């Protein structure tokens, strides 16, 4: 079986890029580590997209092992749409709250920064 194609929502791509830039400005090794985590996420999720737990009723979530981030993604036919590269200690982005069916961040016990 061929690996699923991965597409990033523009907001998710921007979050990944700005996170990399934030790490790079402080510690280039940490920035490279974050990039490696992104690569590993792509490999893990494309190898078995249904292996990761549900996040709400429609999305799934892959949690990065070494960084406080996760991918929230949808399966769309033979492709994977990454909706967010979300920080674990920040309020969920509006798109994720919509996908989870949440009107308020407190409904899912998320912290707010």
Image (spheres, grey):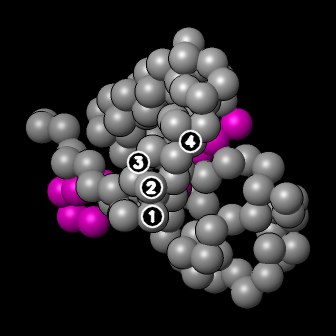
Closer to the camera in the image, 85 or 23: 23
Q: Is residue 76 magenta?
A: yes
Few, some or many residues within 10 Å of mark 3 (<14, 14–19, 20+): few
Q: Is residue 14 left or right of residue 98?
A: left
Of marks 4 and 2, which one's residue comes earlier in the chain? Answer: 2
Numbered disc 3: secondary structure: helix
Kindly report the distance in space between the C-alpha atoms of the residues bearing marks 1 and 3: 23 Å
- Look at mark 4 in the image and give the residue it sits on: 19
Quadrant containing the N terminus is: top left
* First in residue order: circle 3 vs circle 4: 4
Q: Name the mark nearer the viewer: 3 or 2.
A: 2
Secondary structure beneath dot 2 equals helix
Crowd rating for badge 4 (residues with CA inside 10 Å; few <14, some 14–19, many 20+):
some
Mark 4 and mark 2: span between their CA atoms? Answer: 8 Å
Q: Which residue is mark 3?
A: 50
Q: Are marks 4 and 1 in contact (CB under 8 Å)?
A: no
Which comes sooner in the sequence, label 4 or label 1? 1
Q: Which mark is residue 14?
A: 2
Report x, y in % for residue 12. Answer: 45, 57
CA gap, disc 3 and disc 4: 26 Å
Determine the CA span between mark 2 and mark 1.
5 Å
Q: Which residues are magenta?
A: 68-80
Q: Residue furthest top?
A: 29
Q: Residue at x 61, y 76 (%)?
A: 94
- Given contact means CB atoms under 8 Å apart, are the residues at marks 3 and 4 in contact? no
Task: Residue 11: give its label.
Answer: 1
Q: Earlier in the sequence, mark 1 or mark 3?
A: 1
Q: Residues within 10 Å of mark 2 (few under 14, many from 20)?
A: some
Mark 1 or mark 3, which is nearer to you?
1
């Amino acid at each position: 079986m061929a690996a699923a194609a991965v597409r990033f929502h523009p907001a998710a791509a921007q979050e990944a890029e700005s996170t990399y830039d934030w790490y790079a400005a402080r510690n280039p090794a940490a920035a490279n580590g974050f990039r490696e985590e992104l690569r590993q996420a792509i490999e893990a999720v494309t190898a078995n997209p249904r292996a990761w737990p549900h996040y709400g009723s429609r999305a799934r979530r892959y949690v990065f092992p070494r960084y406080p981030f996760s991918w929230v993604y949808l399966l769309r036919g033979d492709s994977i749409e990454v909706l967010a590269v979300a920080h674990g200690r920040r309020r969920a982005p509006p798109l994720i709250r919509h996908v989870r069916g949440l009107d308020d961040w407190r409904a899912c016990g998320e912290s707010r920064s």
